[in-house]
Image: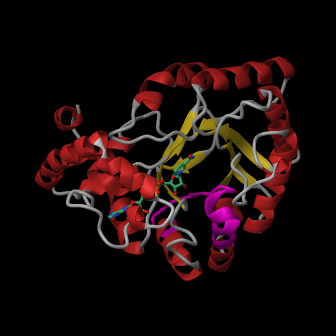
């Protein structure tokens, strides 16, 4: 495993990490969660990603229990949570968003569910137009001061809001955000590659990127329709299937057909090519893997060994296939 600094911070995260969106509770119960977390940990993964909203808090319950059962030393791994969407199906006004009230309470609730004393990483899961950024920065700073959060960051915030958070923190001697969690994969590149470019330079922003396989499309498994038991067949994820069936979805599948030829030539799976491509970007601190089985996870973790095959020539062939 390779370890990368999370931006300019001193925190070293494994270049591949493991997250629980969709999978924990919907597809994976405690026993398989333990197997997946154990497989990842044994491969050197030291960051496990979560959020209050994943399976309405059930995902944090499972992850906390699994980590406790596995008995790893708390200082050998990092865990995150995220605040914004709430942990209930129809949250009341005080139970979601980035107000001081919800940021504080969501942190305490996540710690309870995870059975932990502190979160290593705590993300504002989206921007909140109804809360002044200063209120959120102060709440995050206070959690850091209280030792309940070690690093705070954002997820899918426009660059201008991250800049605003930094200038508020700078002006008021508060803790600024250290990292952002954006989507990044062969199909979604704009934010990580262009919009955030000044932020790496000016603030040393780290990134923990999500959906590196575009929810599985970049494995090639959707090239001939939606396979049984896959994410796009799950109740509640019809929106993903609809996206696959529109014009953009069809273009994506056509690109995967071309990419699969390159992957085959290089002796790796399509998923490994897509993950290795994410790892090539030096502004990516960690690629968060999703997997609904140990078998998928093992294949994905092996992407680490494939990165050196992505030479400049291969990278331009990949760019041509996705243009
Ligand atoms: P991916 O895009 O990698 O999709 C993962 C899914 O693809 C798996 O659950 C599985 O679904 C399928 N898959 C993965 N590997 C393989 C394989 N080798 N062969 C076949 N199918 C495979 O990642 P996620 O979308 O899950 O995102 C990763 C993590 O990022 C999340 O767990 C979460 O922690 C974080 N995240 C953060 C967000 C944010 O807003 N901050 C938003 C979304 C995710 P299946 O088997 O069911 O088909």
Seen from the viewer's position, the closer of residues 58 and 282 is 58
- The residue that appears at 47% across and 59% down in the rendered structure is 237
Q: How many marks?
A: 0
Q: Quadrant of residue 127?
A: top right
Q: Residue at x 65, y 55 (%)?
A: 51
Q: Say if the magenta span includes residue 44.
A: yes
Is residue 123 in view from this perspective? yes
Colour mapping used in the image: secondary structure
Res. 77 in view: no
Image position, residue 113 (x, y; %): 75, 67
Quadrant where the N terminus lies?
bottom left
Quarter holding the C terminus?
Answer: top left
- In magenta segment, residue 43: yes
In the foreground, 16 or 25: 25
Query: Could you say where residue 230 lies in the image, as x and y percent from the top left?
Result: 37, 67
**Closer to the camera in the image, 296 or 233:** 233
Task: Please tell me in which quadrant of the rendered image residue 298 appears.
Answer: bottom left
Residue furthest to the bottom:
31
Give how far across and how far down residue 14 sits, in percent: 51, 52
Q: At 71% across and 34% down in the image, what residue appears?
A: 128
**On screen, residue 210 above or below 153:** below
Query: Closest to the observer: 73 or 297?
Result: 297
Residues shaded magenta: 41-64
Classify 307 as above or below 311: below
Looking at the picture, does residue 32 appear above or below residue 232?
below
Whole-percent x, y for residue 321 in the image: 18, 37
Task: Tell which quarter ligand 1 is in.
Answer: bottom left
Q: Residue at x 66, y 80 (%)?
A: 69
């Amino acid at each position: 495993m390779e370890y990368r600094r999370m931006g300019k911070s001193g925190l070293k995260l494994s270049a591949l990490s493991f997250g629980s969106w969709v999978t924990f509770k919907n597809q994976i119960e405690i026993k398989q969660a333990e197997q997946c977390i154990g497989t990842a940990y044994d491969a050197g993964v030291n960051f496990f990603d979560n959020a209050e909203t994943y399976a309405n808090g059930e995902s944090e319950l499972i992850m906390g229990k699994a980590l406790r059962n596995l008995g790893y030393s708390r200082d050998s791994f990092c865990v995150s949570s995220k605040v914004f969407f709430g942990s209930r199906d129809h949250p009341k006004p005080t139970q979601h968003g980035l107000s001081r009230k919800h940021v504080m309470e969501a942190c305490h609730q996540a710690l309870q569910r995870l059975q932990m004393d502190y979160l290593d990483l705590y993300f504002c899961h989206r921007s909140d137009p109804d809360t002044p950024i200063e209120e959120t920065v102060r709440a995050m700073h206070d959690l850091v001061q209280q030792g309940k959060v070690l690093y705070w960051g954002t997820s899918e915030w426009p660059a201008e809001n991250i800049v605003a958070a930094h200038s508020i923190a700078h002006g008021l001697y508060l803790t600024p955000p250290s990292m952002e969690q954006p989507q990044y994969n062969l199909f979604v590149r704009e934010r990580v590659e262009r919009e955030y470019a000044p932020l790496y330079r000016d603030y040393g922003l780290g990134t923990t990127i999500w959906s590196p396989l575009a929810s599985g499309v970049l494995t090639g498994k959707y090239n001939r329709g939606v396979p049984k038991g896959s994410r796009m067949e799950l109740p509640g994820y019809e929106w993903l299937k609809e996206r696959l069936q529109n014009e953009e979805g069809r273009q994506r599948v056509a690109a995967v057909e071309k990419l699969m030829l390159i992957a085959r030539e290089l002796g790796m799976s399509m998923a490994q090519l897509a993950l290795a491509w994410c790892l090539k970007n030096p502004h990516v601190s960690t690629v968060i893997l999703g997997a609904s089985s140990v078998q998928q996870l093992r294949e994905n973790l092996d992407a680490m060994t494939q990165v050196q095959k992505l030479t400049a020539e291969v990278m331009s062939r990949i760019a041509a296939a996705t243009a």
